[in-house]
Amino acid sequence: MPDGPTALQLVFGGDPALYAIVALSLYVSLSAVVLAALLALPLGAFLALTHFPGRTFIVVLINAFMGLPPVVVGLAVYLLLSRSGPLGSLGILFTPKAMIVAQALLVLPIIAALTRQTIEDLWTEYREELTALRVTPARRVATLLWDARFSLVTTLLAGFGRAAAEVGTVMIVGGNIDGFTRTMTTAIALETSKGDLPLAMGLGLVLIVLIVAVNALAWGARRIGEVRAG
Amino acid sequence: MRAPVTDLPLAFEGATLRARGVEIVGNLTLEVVAGAPTVLLGPNGSGKSTLLRLAMGLVRPTAGRVTWGGRPAPDERLAMVFQRPVMLRRSVGANVAFALGRRNEPRIRELLERVGLAALAHRPARRLSGGEQQRLALARALARDPEILFLDEPTASLDPAATKAVEDIVRDVAASGVKIVMATHDIGQARRLAGDIVFLSRGRLVERADAVQFFSLPSSLEAAAFLRGDLVI
């Protein structure tokens, strides 16, 4: 093992490079979850409340896409955003924006599928009451999403977990550029391959602590919300 | 006093509901007019709740039809309270605001005062007791300013004190001119509230009579047995 600082020294030593990597990782993963949620929450609710030809196929497809191989998504986004690709003119390949898009695509099926299931279950309970109150379809979606908010926090956490732990996609579309698109997961992969195990372990430690902290914060917010809203 | 009910009579014309080969309500012909509360009486499984759901348009008859003044079920001026009402995951006041469709504080307060829940306006609705939840469901229903209010066994799981509170509100609402149609299997409650009785058994209309006449001299053997306390299945 090479001489140098230990994992804990790196974590607590105020290394600006390490903090930059941590900050970028959080920014990319949280942005991806927000972007995916904006699309997936209404999509999941829509699928839960409507019946149309092909709906079952879409539901099965979204469920299957929860297990999308990240490298395949990375490859698809790479082809879309590469200079000769249909969205190449955007010029965002090898930038954090491309990483956000790729992670959002990975997270979207998870949030949509779990939202659909949650809202479908809640709709079974609410159907007669909302129908008797003559609530419009659009308001049903909003009402069910709001009343399922505490369950949906868990759904968003599942999405965040997927995004934060992801390495293959961001490696392909971000390029793992030092100081620009290097995240904790890509840095861990790189440093491990270089043999710099203390840095890899330090980053791994930070990654786990962050995931636990985000989950703890969300759990606390959920509990406070449940106590207040009943 | 309200304006005269204009969507009545509510008419069931040979209304039948079958589900998975089982007839839940069969060939029901019945007319509900404005006036004193109509109570649907009968044992469990007699079709009382289904009749209310047919009237509200929550289910459609598989044969026959249900009309309101000759028209399909309207979207306005009718409301329903269920045996186990769903409490929206928000405060008591917000539940009423939801039914109102807007945050009208004076109206919310007025409705909550009417059902005796004004002091609990900020409490989470799901934290209320069973009786309080039922009264909130009544406030939500009244927020729709109904001219006809359907009640599906609203006190079935309540203690006597909570039952009395709900019955007092029902009487008050009926006195204000709202037509009440209530399902119950509680003979005492039917005696206390009914203007007329619709007695159902096994999905069929067995007897329709003025409440005083029904309780003093029922014309069907099934109704007589039910009133005696025999097990009518």
Image: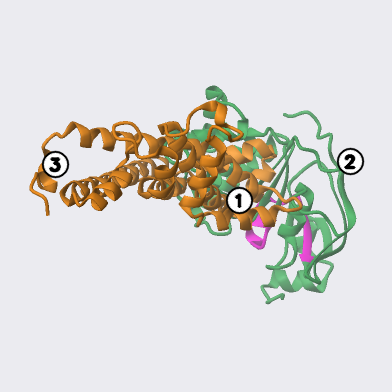
Chain colours: A orange, B green
Q: Amino acid at mark 2?
A: Arg
Q: Quadrant of the C terminus of chain A?
A: top left
Q: Which chain is mark 2 on?
A: B
Task: Tell me where residue A51 appears, x and y as whole percent.
Answer: 72, 51
* Range of magenta residues: B183-200
Q: Is residue B14 magenta?
A: no
Same subunit: marks 1 and 3:
yes
Q: Are marks 1 and 2 in contact (CB under 8 Å)?
A: no
What residue is rendered at 23% in x and 49% in y?
A194
- Residue B228 to residue A218: above or below: below
Cα–Cα span, label 2 and label 3: 76 Å
Task: Tell me where residue B175 appears, x and y as whole percent.
Answer: 69, 37
SS class, disc 2: loop
SS class, disc 3: helix
What residue is rendered at 55% in x and 54% in y?
A65
Residue matched to label 1: A123
Cα–Cα span, label 1 and label 3: 50 Å
Residue matched to label 2: B71
Q: Amino acid at mark 1?
A: Trp
Q: Which mark is residue A10?
A: 3
Q: Is residue B210 left or right of residue B175?
A: right
User: Which is more toward the observer, B138 or B40?
Assistant: B138
Cα–Cα span, label 1 and label 2: 29 Å
